[in-house]
Amino acid sequence: MQSFDKNRVKPTLWPAFQGRGVYRTVLALGLMSAALSGCAIMTEGPKQAYPRQVQQPQTLPSAVLSRHEDHLSHATMERLLHQSITYHLGAGDVVSVSVYLHPDLSIPSPMTSTTGLSGAIVTNDGNIQLPLLGVVHVAGMTTTQLQTRLTRLYAQYVIDPKVSVQLQVAHSIRYYLLGEFIKPGLVYSDRPLNVLEAMALGGSVNLTDADLRGAYVVQDGRKLPVNFHKLILAGDLQQNIPLKTGDTVLIPSITTMRAYVFGAVNKAGPVPFVNGRLSLLQALSDAGMNTTNLTTARLSEIRIIRSEGATGQFYVVDARRILEGKAAPFYLKSGDIVYVPQTTVSSWNQAILLLLPSLQAINQLLNPFVSIKFLSQ
């Protein structure tokens, strides 16, 4: 650094620098400038020299103590879902009947005036009108069964009759599409359909507001374990089962989502979701348990049955740790069954036995897995 020589400064300017205060100020500004320059140089150096300390948020552990999964047996699934659907005659169907070498007994020769179709129409009473035989009840019969019956009836009048029966038009096939369909209601088909084909008659499904976990098919008065999540979102065609006439496909709304709480609570039964969400502690509170006051209930061993389609998941959850802030919240799903034991439960078999009376009381509301697995015996 070049030394400062006062002799090189003009005499008229030097007196301005002779004051100690001014000199010190200039010197301090110079030192400060050098320091700042040094800081800039250090800042531009490797970042590893001055790492920034970023505090990571602490993640609470899970409150789940154990979990296992169970499935309906293959034989049960085949019996319920993959049976062959045989068509049975019903009101509105049109059938043709021919008797070999006896055209006068065949139905019909002229065209049916009301429909423009050739054949005998099954009435609302399930009957058809045939020459010589008069009224014959056919509802609920297959065409093969009807052929066998007509052969026996015509044998009273014709030697060795050769009878043939064919379904001309299937007007009795109908399905009920309920819930989150664009066009819900009663739909008709001229042939038997599977689930996806029937659903297409309802326009489409409003997936934004649909509770697919709670969706089901009702056939012969019972819910079938069809997994609509896999069917619609994953394209699993194993779930695309054939339907019978009169079957119901129901896609409920998320506004109807419920969990079911039983055991050591004051108000056992369904608990609604709020905006599609419901935590375990919220459900316990809504069911009448004061979660701020630890009761005699075994909060550390709450059991939860979660099911969808043919699969059930069984959880043991420590709600006490959630309550104490030592574990993350546990969120329920539509159809979950929550059991708060009063005393220690040694096994899931014991828990199911204690739950059975409550499950039987709400059997019609349960997901199919639970009804078939525990209540169909």
Image (spheres, grey):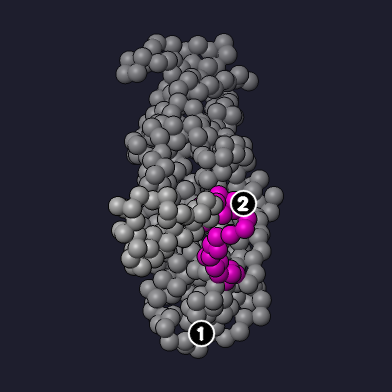
The quadrant in which residue 279 appears is bottom left
The quadrant of the rendering that contains the C terminus is bottom right
Which portion, as a residue range, is magenta?
A: 39-64
Query: Is there any visible trace of residue 73 in the rendered image?
Result: yes
x, y (%) of residue 27?
42, 61
Q: Is residue 331 above or below residue 206?
A: below
Q: Nearer the viewer, mark 2 or mark 1?
A: 2
Q: Where residue 215 is drawn, which disc sits there?
A: none
Q: Is residue 48 above or below residue 64?
A: above
Q: CA distance from mark 2 to mark 1?
A: 59 Å
- In the drawing, does residue 310 fall left or right of residue 264? right
The answer to the question of whether label 2 and label 1 lie on touching residues, with beta carbons closer than 8 A, is no
x, y (%) of residue 164?
57, 20
State whether the magenta stretch is mostly helix, strand or loop. loop
- In the drawing, does residue 145 fall left or right of residue 73? left
Which residue has dot 2 on it? 46
Earlier residue among tags 2 and 1: 2
Closer to the camera, 320 or 263?
A: 320
Which residue has dot 1 on it? 297
Q: Residue at x 63, y 72 (%)?
A: 65
Q: Residue at x 38, y 12 (%)?
A: 111
Q: Residue at x 41, y 71 (%)?
A: 282
